[in-house]
Amino acid sequence: MKQIIIEGNHLLSGTIKIGGAKNSAVALIPAAILAKGDLKIKNVPNISDKDALIEILDLLNVKAVEYQNELLINTSNIKNALISEQLSNRLRASYYFMGALLGRFKKVEIYFPGGCNIGSRPIDLHLKGFEALGATINKEGSKYIIEAKELKGTEIYLDFASVGATINLLLAAVLARGKTIINNAAREVEIENVAKFLNKMGANIKGAGTERIVINGVRELHGAEISVIPDRIEAGTYIIMGALIGHNLTIDGINPNHLKVVLNKLKEMGVKFKTNKHQVTLTKTNQFKAVNVRTAVYPGFPTDLGQPMSVLLTQATGISQFEETIFENRMGHVPNLQKMGAKIEYERQHATFHGPNKLHGAELTATDLRSGAALVTAGLIAEGTTIINDAEHILRGYERIITKLSDVGAKIKIVDV
Ligand code: UD1
């Protein structure tokens, strides 16, 4: 097990450079197998989810070479193969090989995906979409065999604007015959990034980033190059840390337009910051106003920042209400924060914060990726030493987090126990 140990209460100043978006990169890598030839993905974050996807590429006989933050992929010798339970289980985004292999080979055998345990996270919308495109689905235990004689474009209505289902259906539809329309599509910026990559490969996708995406199927896709957009969740996490304990802390290499809702909420709380085209710089704020936060699909407040944001709510004066609307089980950080001295009442998807509370170091356990990020945030402002068990969760989505924080003054280390 990996443990993160933090000696709290050291001011952060300097610059933190943000990497490529996890949720884009984990879709761009599977998307690459739809093309014949050479592909280059730039600004790939160095996270363990990426390593798991490269193992899947290897299994499919797809060559992937990493050079710094670039990933060079060659699909010339690709072979369809069963993706084992052990590999599917490593991360949520293994499910993008459903759409990609179905698109490329009209057949995929794969197990139910893994990922953070933050709710039941069914994949029924993905499967219904594949069926609408003409695929049949057989399930043996947790293994799915999805195949089609031919994929045919159709009009799909998603019951919920799911990020995963929208991208998976894009992947399956780009090589389908005719026109596919995805209604009530998710609008996350990562989806635009994926559509841009597919269009550079020769696909014909219009409307990505809106709730109606139109895909005109093409016969084949060719090599292309794409850069992963900046990670708005990684950026948001460091911005929240900066709000709490930063002084002249710059979060660099971001697109502030992707973080408007978060920055607006911070402004409402009285956080002092300045933005320019690619940066946010925070200065020390002494008092935060209580606010209400409700997560929602894009462009609403991102569910992935709800947990780090909770730490800021423990420091606000008065009562703050927090509501998580996307996942049923995203409060794993709360008992940990309570252990540190936070006054929070909560039930499944609601929490009430009575702040401000002085936090003290404690031994904690990360229950998922973003709860882990919240615990790191709390450890940075706590009095004394905080130990975070099961820190592997954090490395799934935050590249070089220990170095990035140490470089701006945090006293933080990671150890194997
Ligand atoms: C993706 C992100 C995750 C983020 C989430 C919401 C990746 C790899 N993960 O997860 O970081 O927190 O978007 O922004 O990009 N649902 C169904 N049936 C389905 C699909 C989804 O009921 O077939 C439900 C889910 O249980 C959840 C909601 O829809 O309650 C949203 O899920 P979705 O947008 O699909 O999230 P993920 O793709 O799992």
Image (cartoon, rainbow, N blue to C red):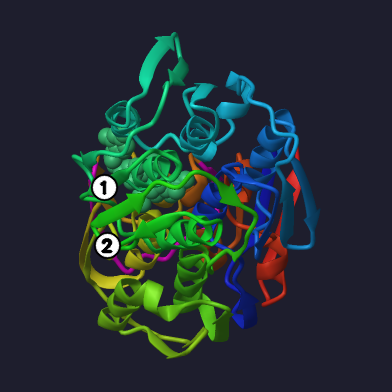
Residue placed most toward the observer, 137 or 415: 137
Q: Which residue is mark 1?
A: 182
Q: Is residue 31 left or right of residue 124?
A: right
Query: Residue drawn at (28%, 75%), measured in percent from left and top?
Result: 265
Q: Quadrant of residue 289?
A: bottom left
Q: Is residue 247 left or right of residue 140?
A: right
- The local secondary structure at tag 1 comes to strand
Which quadrant of the frame does ligand 1 lie within? top left
Q: Quadrant of residue 347?
A: top left
Residue placed most toward the observer, 362 or 137: 137
Residue 334 in sight here: no
Instruction: Check residue 356 for magenta coloring.
Output: yes
Instruction: Check residue 163 for magenta coloring.
Output: no
Query: Residue drawn at (42%, 52%), measured in percent from left and top?
Result: 337
Which residue type does callout 2 highlight? Answer: Thr
Q: Residues within 10 Å of mark 1 (few under 14, many from 20)?
A: many
Whether 237 is drawn above or below 204: the answer is below
Q: Which residue is mark 2?
A: 210
Mark found first going from the N terminus, 1 or 2? 1
Query: Magenta region: which residues?
Result: 349-366
Quadrant placement of the N terminus:
top right
